[in-house]
Image: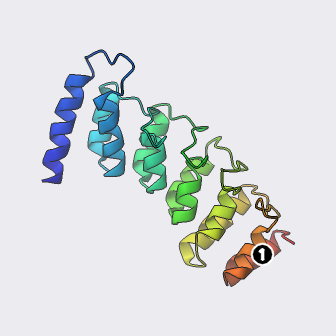
């Protein structure tokens, strides 16, 4: 049934791509975000080929690119990047596409995004960078440790502090993240 829904959306999206939008959101862009959320690469590519806008936002300020990244749909993120995804796009929390997969433990997506010009040091509305997100909202499991390792290797500021003055190392220690704390100290965190 799920696949049938995507076929209907795809057909509807193809039809709507030819209609003027008059400033309203286009259904083809809604369908692209649905394909991103559902990890439907075939529909995603087809909709892009039909003119869907990878950077079109919904009322929550999410684009297909931001949705795919947050959910760790790496192949979709690659397709979105190839289609001109805006690396400076921010969601309603002021977070870049790097932040969602960093805290959700999607190491492959983080690796892909770190190979782009995405803002590594961007601070979101909560006062956190991607490194802080991975520590504060992550855990000391293997996926989050790998993400912290990649962020450090890419040049994240290991002495970054949140808006309350709490450092990345202090957050890791408070959360019992022994391995993350060791990585931060080894990288010069105080």
Q: Residues within 10 Å of mark 1 (few under 14, many from 20)?
A: some
Tell which of 130 and 107 is nearer to you.
130
Q: Is residue 101 left or right of residue 140?
A: left
Q: Which is more toward the observer, 170 or 140?
A: 170
Q: Residue at x 19, y 23 (%)?
A: 15
Residue in the image at 58% along x and 49% along y: 93
Residue 59 at x, y percent in the picture: 43, 39
Residue 2 against residue 14 in the figure, above or below:
below
Q: How many marks?
A: 1
Instruction: Please tell me in which quadrant of the rendered image residue 138 appears.
Output: bottom right
Between 11 and 82, the one lying in front of the other is: 11
Q: Do we see residue 183 in this rendering?
A: no
Q: Quadrant of residue 153?
A: bottom right
The answer to whether 137 appears left or right of 70 in the picture is right
Q: Is residue 37 left or right of residue 91?
A: left
At mark 1, the secondary structure is helix
Residue plotted at (42% across, 41% down): 64
Q: How is the image coloured?
A: rainbow
- Nearest the camera: 108 or 170? 170
| Residue 144 position in % (x across, y down) | 58, 70
Q: Quadrant of residue 32?
A: top left
Q: Is residue 98 above or below residue 139?
A: above
Relative vertical location of residue 121 with respect to residue 106 in this rendering, above or below: above
Q: Is residue 3 visible?
A: yes
Give percent across and percent down for residue 112: 54, 51
Q: Could you tell me which quadrant the C terminus lies in?
A: bottom right
Q: Identify the residue position indicated by label 1 in the image.
A: 170
Q: Position of residue 143 (x, y in %)?
A: 54, 71
Q: Is residue 27 left or right of residue 129?
A: left
């Amino acid at each position: 049934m799920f696949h049938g829904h995507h076929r209907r959306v795809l057909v509807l999206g193809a039809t709507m791509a030819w209609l003027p939008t008059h400033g309203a959101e286009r259904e083809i862009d809604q369908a692209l975000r649905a394909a991103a959320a559902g990890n439907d690469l075939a529909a995603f590519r087809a909709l892009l080929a039909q003119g869907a806008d990878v950077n079109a936002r919904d009322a929550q300020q999410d684009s297909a690119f931001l949705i795919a990244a947050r959910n760790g749909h790496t192949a979709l993120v690659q397709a979105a990047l190839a289609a001109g995804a805006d690396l400076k796009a921010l969601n309603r929390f002021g977070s870049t596409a790097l932040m969602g997969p960093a805290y959700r433990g999607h190491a492959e997506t983080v690796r892909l995004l770190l190979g782009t010009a995405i803002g590594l040091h961007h601070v979101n509305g909560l006062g956190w960078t991607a490194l802080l997100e991975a520590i504060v909202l992550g855990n000391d499991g293997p996926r989050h440790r790998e993400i912290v390792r990649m962020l450090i290797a890419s040049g994240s500021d290991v002495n970054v502090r949140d808006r309350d003055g709490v450092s990345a190392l202090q957050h890791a220690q408070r959360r019992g993240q022994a391995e993350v704390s060791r990585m931060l100290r080894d990288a010069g965190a105080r």
